[in-house]
């Protein structure tokens, strides 16, 4: 099996790389420092029609393959990880609609996501039910032609910014994971956003609490059948985790690029530090790990494109996400080390790369949970 990029994918990468350098990277430090949504960067992405990339052509999207989507996630993250996650999470919010939603939901929401008119969020985690999804307390009770939602969700990307929220709630608490259902909820239905987090990294990507107090949701907004929510959630995460790996690869590549450039300019002992073998070897190891992570991410994405013929996607997605994110954290930390004292200051971007890398080891399933998934596959 080959993972060489096609000529179209290579051309897309080059165009996107220039776009990121010109329109995204210059704003990254400002939005990170001010901890506000990167509106200029988002608007630039809409101009490039990037929100449409992952959505089906039948609903106004571009219908791009997963490898191309990984290229987008990587290149955007190379310039601004917060902007990258903004593009990824609208797709995450819409994946249940694309794969399990009714035709009416697809027609109503997918074209508006594709055009950038609205954004979407994915509401699975709770304060006491992150990795342990079956313990969720958010409830949805049927009342005539509606469901009434009560409860809250934590750690929600784009909370308050997004217009729609794909919410997982229990319709049958006694059944635990088999009693979870999925709903598409509009902000205008009465969703509340009482708290936003002051975060270590991804500071330009709002993360907050999403609260439902007797929020009435039409039964037509249920995604899939009652009790299918857990299956929908896991199916969705299998198909989104590889792009978190791609985001991590982008952060790692940004770290390599900046550290390498710095090494050629910074002088010590009468010569550029790029001539010091110990530091050259550090940079080489950073590149080796990043190339390996990129290859694993592409393999997982190609498996999605091929329809997972060998049933390996859950395993490969977990492996790609965990290896790439561990790599990003390691590589970004080494970049700080290569810059020495300067790397520890906010005058240089490598400290932001290190802060942004950390969350890739945590969200969409911690890397410890990914290892549980991988070991289950290996020992089945």
Image (cartoon, grey):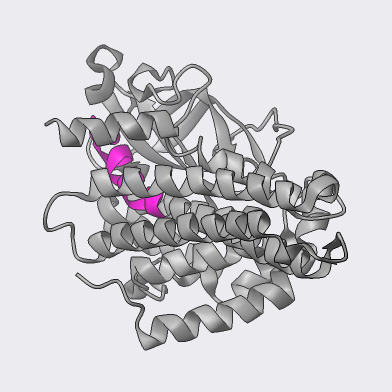
Q: Front-most of 86 and 269?
A: 269
Q: Which residue lies furthest to the top in this view?
A: 174
Q: Front-most of 209 and 12?
A: 12
Quadrant where the C terminus lies? top left
The answer to which image quadrant residue 255 occupies is bottom right
Quadrant where the N terminus lies? bottom left
Magenta-drawn stretch contains 238: yes
Horizontally, residue 200 falls left or right of residue 340, namely left
Q: Where is residue 28 in the image (x, y as percent from the top left)?
A: 75, 59
- Give the residue drawn at x 20%, y 65%: 306
Q: Where is residue 118 in the image (x, y as percent from the top left)?
A: 57, 59
Q: Report whether residue 372 is seen.
A: yes
Tally the marks: 0
Horizontally, residue 179 falls left or right of residue 76, namely left
As displayed, is residue 336 above or below residue 198?
below
As displayed, is residue 175 above or below residue 22?
above
Magenta-drawn stretch contains 297: no
The answer to which image quadrant residue 158 occupies is top right
Specify the principal SS of the magenta part: helix
Q: Front-most of 339 and 159?
A: 339
Q: Front-most of 298 and 117?
A: 298
In this picture, which residue range is highlighted in magenta?
A: 227-242
As displayed, is residue 138 above or below residue 216?
above
- Give the residue drawn at x 51%, y 62%: 73
- Give the residue drawn at x 47%, y 54%: 289
Horizontally, residue 283 falls left or right of residue 60, namely right
């Amino acid at each position: 099996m080959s993972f060489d990029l096609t000529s179209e994918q290579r051309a897309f990468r080059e165009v996107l790389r220039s776009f990121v350098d010109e329109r995204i990277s210059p704003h990254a430090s400002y939005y990170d420092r001010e901890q506000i949504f990167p509106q200029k960067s988002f608007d630039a992405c809409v101009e490039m029609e990037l929100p449409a990339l992952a959505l089906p052509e039948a609903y106004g999207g571009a219908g791009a393959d997963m490898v191309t989507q990984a290229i987008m996630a990587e290149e955007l993250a190379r310039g601004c990880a917060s902007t990258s996650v903004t593009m990824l999470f609208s797709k995450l919010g819409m994946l249940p609609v694309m794969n399990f939603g009714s035709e009416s939901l697809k027609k109503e929401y997918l074209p508006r996501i594709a055009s950038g008119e609205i954004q979407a969020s994915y509401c699975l985690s709770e304060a006491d039910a992150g990795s342990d999804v079956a313990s969720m307390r958010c409830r949805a009770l049927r009342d005539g032609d509606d469901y009434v939602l009560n409860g809250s969700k934590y750690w929600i990307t784009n909370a308050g910014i997004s217009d729609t929220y794909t919410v997982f709630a229990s319709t049958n608490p006694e059944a635990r994971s088999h009693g979870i259902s999925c709903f598409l909820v509009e902000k205008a239905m009465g969703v509340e956003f009482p708290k936003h987090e002051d975060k270590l990294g991804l500071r330009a990507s709002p993360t907050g609490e999403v609260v439902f107090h007797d929020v009435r949701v039409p039964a037509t907004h249920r995604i899939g059948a009652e009790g299918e929510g857990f299956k929908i959630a896991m199916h969705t995460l299998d198909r989104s985790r590889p792009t978190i790996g791609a985001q991590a690869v982008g952060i790692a590549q940004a770290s390599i690029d900046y550290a390498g450039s710095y090494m050629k300019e910074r002088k010590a002992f009468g010569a550029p530090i790029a001539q010091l073998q110990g530091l050259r070897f550090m940079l080489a190891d950073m590149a080796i790990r990043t190339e390996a992570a990129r290859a694993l991410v592409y393999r997982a994405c190609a498996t999605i494109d091929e329809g997972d013929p060998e049933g390996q996607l859950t395993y490969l997605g977990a492996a790609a996400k965990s290896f790439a994110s561990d790599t990003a954290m390691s590589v970004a930390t080494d970049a700080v080390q290569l810059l020495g004292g300067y790397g520890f200051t906010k005058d240089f971007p490598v400290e932001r790369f290190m802060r942004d890398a950390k969350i890739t080891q945590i969200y969409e399933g911690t890397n410890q949970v990914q290892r549980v998934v991988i070991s289950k596959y290996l020992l089945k």
